Image: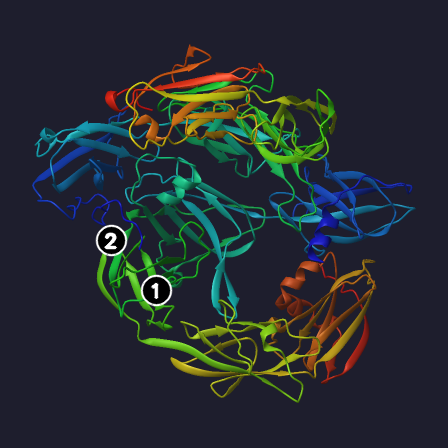
Amino acid sequence: MLPFPILLASAVLAGPAQQPSQGPPVARFNGLVVNSQTHQPLRRAAIMIDESGKQWTTYSDRDGRFTFLNLEPGDGTLTVHRDGYTDRTYKIASSDFNKQTGFSAELDPQGLITGRVVDGTGQPLQGTVIEALRPSAQGSNLEAAASTETNDVGEFRLASLDPGTFRVRATYREGRTSEFDPTPLTVGTAWLGGPDTPTSVEVKSGSAIGEIDFVLNPVRPVTIRGTLHTDRGMLRERATLWIQGQAGEGGHNDSAEKGNFEVSDVFPGTWTVSAQTLSETSPLFGVTTVSVRNFDVDGVDILLRPVPILEGELAIEGAVPAGLALGPVYFNASNRVNSISFHMARPDRDRKFSTPLVSGEYTLAFDASITGLGIKEVTLDGKPVTDWTLRISDAPETKKLLIVLKGAQEKGGQQR
Amino acid sequence: MRGLFVFALLTVAPVGAQPAVAFKVHVVDSLSGAPIGGANVTLSRDNGGGTWGRTDVTGVFAGQAEPTGACILFVARKGYRTTGGGPLGHAVELRPEGQNDFTVNMLPLGVLTGRILDQYGDPLRNAIVRTEDKLSTPEGDAFQSSSTAVTDDRGEYRISEVEPGKHFIAVEYSSSRTERGLGVRQSTRWPQTGGLLLYPNAKDISQAYEVEVTAGTVTRLRDVRLTIGPAVIISGHIQPSPSEQGQQLSLTRTDNLALNSMPTVQGGRSEADGSFKLSALPGKYVLAASDPKTGKTSRPLPIELADEDVTGLTIDLNVEYRISGRISLEGDERLDFSKLTLNFGGQPVKLDVNGAFQSDLFQPKGRYLLRELPAGWYVKSLDVAGKRISGHLFLIEPGISDVTLTLSPQAAKVSVLAIKGDSGLTAAIVLLLPDAGADPDVESALVAEADGSGTFTIPGVPPGAYRVFALDTSGWVFAMRPDLLLEKYRQDAPLIEVKERERRELTTRTLKLKPE
C-alpha cells in the first residue's frame, strides 16, 4: 500500500484543512501569507502545521489567506512553502490557536540570475546547462543550488535562488545524442570570470542579476594518459583512479593495470587525478593535478605512497556496561580525493580499531551505541579534536585517535 | 551487428596514409537559402572512421578525407533538420580528382511560445509544455512527444525544434516532479499538487485543439490557465482480497499521452483485508485490480478525479482472461518444447512435454512472442477460440480461451546477395517484409544482418509474399520502422513469393532513399 505519512488537506486548494483522523477537533488556526518586501498576498502557498510529527496541510486562497479547522492546539511549527520564495518555519504555541487576528507569515522572494550563452561566432548555444554553485555543507567542494538550460535564443533565467554567494558555470554538450548520431561529442564549459579569476555573484532576496553572459567554444574531449609509481619503481598492482574537477564535477572511477592508466572524455579544465591500490589495510595512494586544454595529455606520473594509518581506541571512564558491544566510528571526507568519501572503522573486543585514511579533513560521526554512552573528549595524537573535525596530515607516521566515553555512570555527555 | 555498426560510425579517425582529397560541405537553410553556421558535419567512410568539423559563418566546412568513394555525410544543427538523404545522412561519393562540393539543405523547425498561469492568474513556473502527436499502433492510439519546454519564473516557455505541421499541446505540472527535477532536498515532505490540461483548456484529447506550426517561424499561443490542485485519494476494497504476491492495482490515464512526469500508470497493493488507497492528481483514469495468484481480474473502472476524494469503491475480482493452449506440430518431426520461449507480454509460460501451457492475461488483449525456434521451423498458424488469427495480436473473451499455435518444419530459406546501389554503399541489413495487400503484417518482418560475405541468409521464412529490402548504413534505422519502409518504398523493393521448403536465392541492389 502507498505510504501516507501526511494527512492531506481538503482536495480544494485554498479550502480549509480537514481534521486529522484521531483526536478531538477543538481548535482553528487562520492566517495570511505575504511577500515580505511588497506585502502583497501570496496565493497557492502551502502551509503545514506540525505538532510532534502529526501534520496538517492547507493552501492559501486568492487573497493569500488560509484556515485550518478542527486542529488539536499545541506547541509545534508552521512551515510555509511557495514557488519563488524561501521556505519559512515559525514556532507556534497553543496560544496562537483560535485567535481572531490571523497569523501573518512573510516569505522572502528568491533571487534570479539571467544571461545569454553564445559561441565564438555569436550564435546562441541552446541547451547549455547553467548552474549556480556554492560550497557544500561539508568541505569546500561546490554543489549546485539551482540549474537551468538556455533556450533556442541562448537565454537563461536561473530562478529559485535563496540569498547567498554563488559561482556560476555554463556547460554545453553537443554530439552523441543517440547511438545513431555519428557527431562526436564536444563540450564547452566556463566559469563566470574565467578559470583563473572566477567571480562570485551575490544574490539577495528578490534581486535580479542580469547580463551574466558566456561565450563558449565547444571542443572535443581529450584523453589523459600516465603511469603510476612507488618509491621502488613502477606500480605492479591494480589501482583505482578517481578524477574530478574543481567543483567536484565529473567525478568518476577508472582503473589502472600494471602501472599504466588512460582516462578518456576529459574536458578542458583543471582536474584532480588520484590513484589508490586495492588493499583494505595498507593501500598506497597518490594524487596530482592535471591542467587540460584542447589536446591529449600524456606522461602524467603519479607517485603512490602508503596511506597513513589511524589507530583508534574507545576508552570508557565509568563503569563498562555488561555485554557492551560498540558499533562503528565513521569518517566522512570533507573534500573528496578518491572514490571513497566515507570510511567506517569497527572497534574490536578491546574497543580498538585501525584504518588507513588519506590525508585531508574528515567529519567524525559515531554509532548510537557510542553516543549513548556520552563522549567526553576526542584527541588526535594528544591534541583535542574540536567540531568533530579531524585533520589527517600526510606524514607517514601512524596517528592515534583517542575517544573517551563517560560510561554507564556518567551519561549525558556530548551528543554526536 | 548493431553495436559494431554504431561503433564504426562513432570512430572518427584522423586522415590515414592514403593521399587525402579536399571536400567542401555547404549547409543551407532550405527556405531562405541563407548559409547555416555552426552545423556539425561528419563524413563517415563506409568501413568506419571519418572526418568531423563545423561550418563557419558562411555555412561552409572544408575538410580532407581519403578518397574511398562511398561515404555518408551527416549534418546536424540545433533548430534544423536535414532534408533529403536517409535518417543517418546523405550517401555521397568522394572522388580523388575534381570538385568534391556537397550542399546539404536544412529545414528550419518551428518554435512555440506562450505563458502558463495558475488558477489565480499568477505565473506558473516549472510547468512542462510539450507537443503531443497521435501515433497509431497495433494496440491502439498512443501519443508521442518530440518537443518539450519548461516554464520559467514568469511562466513563459519556448518549445523549440517543433516539426512543422499540426500538434496537440499538453501542459502539466507536478510539484513532486519539480522537486526531483531541481534536486531540491526539502526537510518537509509536502503533499503532491499538480494539474494537467490539453491546449487550450481541454480535459481530454477529444476537446483539444491542434496548433499549426510553420517552418522557421515563432508562433505565440494564448495564455493557458492551469488549475493546480492537491492529489486526491482513491480508496476502497478489493473482493475477494488478493494474495500477497505481485502488483494488484493499476491506475491508467484514459488518454495515452506522452507524459513523463506523471506516470500514466500508478501501481499499488491492497492491504491484507483487500482495502486500498491510492493518490492521484485530477484527471480521467481507468482503475483495475487483479490477483496474480488466482488470475482473476476486475472489469476496468473509469474514474474522473476532480477536487474530491473518491472513497468506498468496491472492486470485484470476477473476471478471468485465461489461455489454455498448446503448441501443435505439423508432420512427424518432433521438437523439444523446453527449448522454446513463449510469452504473452509477461513472464515466459511453462510448456509441458506435450507443448501444453496455461497463461493469465488479466486483460482481453494478448500478444504472443515465440523465440528459440530451431532453423527451418516457422509459426504456420494461430487459432484463438477456434478462429484463425493473422499476426501476433489477438483478443479473447472473459473465461478460458483455447489457443493453438501450429508450428511447421517446412520453412523456406531465402538468401539475398545485396550489391551496392547508386549510393555506392554496401548493404548493412536485409529485411523481408510480408506483402499481404493493403494491410501488411509488419510485425512479422524477418531480418538478416551482414555476415561479411555480402550474402544475407534467413532460414525460417514462412511461405508467402515478401518485399525484399537491402539497406545501407544511411537507411539502416528504417529497419525499426518497417511500416514506413513499406509505405514509402514498397514499389522499389523486389517482390518474391516463397513456398514451403523452398530454397530461394536472389540478388538485389541496396535501396536508394528518396529525398523527403
- The N terminus of chain A sits in image quarter: bottom left
Q: Name the residue under label 1.
A: B286
Front one among B361 and A387: A387
Front one among A204 and B121: A204
Q: Residue A240 location, x and y as percent?
A: 62, 33
Q: Name the residue under label 2.
A: B307
Q: Is residue B512 left or right of residue B149?
A: right
- Name which residue lies at 48% across and 74% down: B366
Q: Is residue A298 left or right of residue B18?
A: left
- The C terminus of chain A sits in image quarter: top left
Residue A408 higher or lower than B444, as above or below: above
Q: Is residue B200 left or right of residue B96?
A: left
- Name which residue lies at 42% across and 58% down: B209
Q: Residue B122 location, x and y as percent?
A: 32, 39
Q: Residue A97 location, x and y as percent?
A: 10, 33
Q: Are marks 1 and 2 on the same chain?
A: yes
What is the three-letter code of the residue carrying label 2?
A: Asp
Q: In what element is the residue under mark 2?
A: loop
What is the three-letter code of the residue carrying label 1?
A: Val
Calculate the distance from the C-alpha at mark 1 to the C-alpha at mark 2: 17 Å
Q: In what element is the residue under mark 1?
A: strand
What subunit carries mark 2? B
